[in-house]
């Protein structure tokens, strides 16, 4: 149980940093003129919201496995993603990514365009405009998206099961520990772990509501 808790905490911290970077980057690209690249990226980012987690995990397995387009070159230099912590981190990141990016996208699209135009008129380039005008404006949406994505990532099972391999003591998160405990018939352990996840989820929900009202 201790190993599962430690891995879950570590995964949450790593995923939070990755989502923060992704959210800031997404905000910048969504301020650019809509083009084919941005449309394709938007579609790929949104897929985990509507695609079954197990199927998403399988697609990632095909890409990141030893024979995959991405996994094969990495495997050749001794870097394995599947059945490792890296696989767990990627699963958590993919699961929560749409919630961050879509929150930021909605905030960008809801901005008053005159703010950006004013910055351009004053001689600011695109990066300066984003840093000084857009980012402060969408910061609340970004934080809300991070809270939502953390809650989603904590409950992730399907993608993690495929990429991480559910190896007890190595790639077993708390959510997977609940899954394993149920199959073992250890309902007491499953109840305790579920209660822990429930408490964290309630705290995240409370933080989101308080943040939204402030």
Image (cartoon, grey):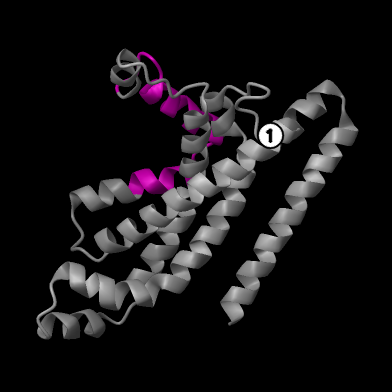
Q: Quadrant of residue 79?
A: top left
Q: How many marks?
A: 1
Looking at the image, residue 102 sits to the left or right of residue 85; the answer is left
Q: Which residues are magenta?
A: 43-69
Task: Say what secondary structure mark 1 lies in.
Answer: helix
Quarter of the figure that contains the C terminus: bottom right
Q: Is residue 110 visible?
A: no
Query: Where residue 150 sits in the image (x, y, percent)?
Result: 57, 53
Residue 46 shown in magenta? yes
Query: Where residue 151 sits in the image (x, y, percent)?
Result: 61, 53
How packed is label 1: few (under 14 Cα within 10 Å), some, or many (20 or more)?
Answer: some
Query: Where residue 110 sits in the image (x, y, percent)?
Result: 36, 75
Q: Quadrant of residue 142?
A: bottom left
Residue in the image at 40% along x and 67% along y? 106
Say above or below: 155 vs 58: below
Residue 88 shown in magenta? no
User: Residue under circle 1?
Assistant: 4
Residue in the image at 71% along x and 62% along y? 203
Q: Quadrant of residue 7?
A: top right
Query: Toward the viewer: 57 or 34?
Result: 57
């Amino acid at each position: 149980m201790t190993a599962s808790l430690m891995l879950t905490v570590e995964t949450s911290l790593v995923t939070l940093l990755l989502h923060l970077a992704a959210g800031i980057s997404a905000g910048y690209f969504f301020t650019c003129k809509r083009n084919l690249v941005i449309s394709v990226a938007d579609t790929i980012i949104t897929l985990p919201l509507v695609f079954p987690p197990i199927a998403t995990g399988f697609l990632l397995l095909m890409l990141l496995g030893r024979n995959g387009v991405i996994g094969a070159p990495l495997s050749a230099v001794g870097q394995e993603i599947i059945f490792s912590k890296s696989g767990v981190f990627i699963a958590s990141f993919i699961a929560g990514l749409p919630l961050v990016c879509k929150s930021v996208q909605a905030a960008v699209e809801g901005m008053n365009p005159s703010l950006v135009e004013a910055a351009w008129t004053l001689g600011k380039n695109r990066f300066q405009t984003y840093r000084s005008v857009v980012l402060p404006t969408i910061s609340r949406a970004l934080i809300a998206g991070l809270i939502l994505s953390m809650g989603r990532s904590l409950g992730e099972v399907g993608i993690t099961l495929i990429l991480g391999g559910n190896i007890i003591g190595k790639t077993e998160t708390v959510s997977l520990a609940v899954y394993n405990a149920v199959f073992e018939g250890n309902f007491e352990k499953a109840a305790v772990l579920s209660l822990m996840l429930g408490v964290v989820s309630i705290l995240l929900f409370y933080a989101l509501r308080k943040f939204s009202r402030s």
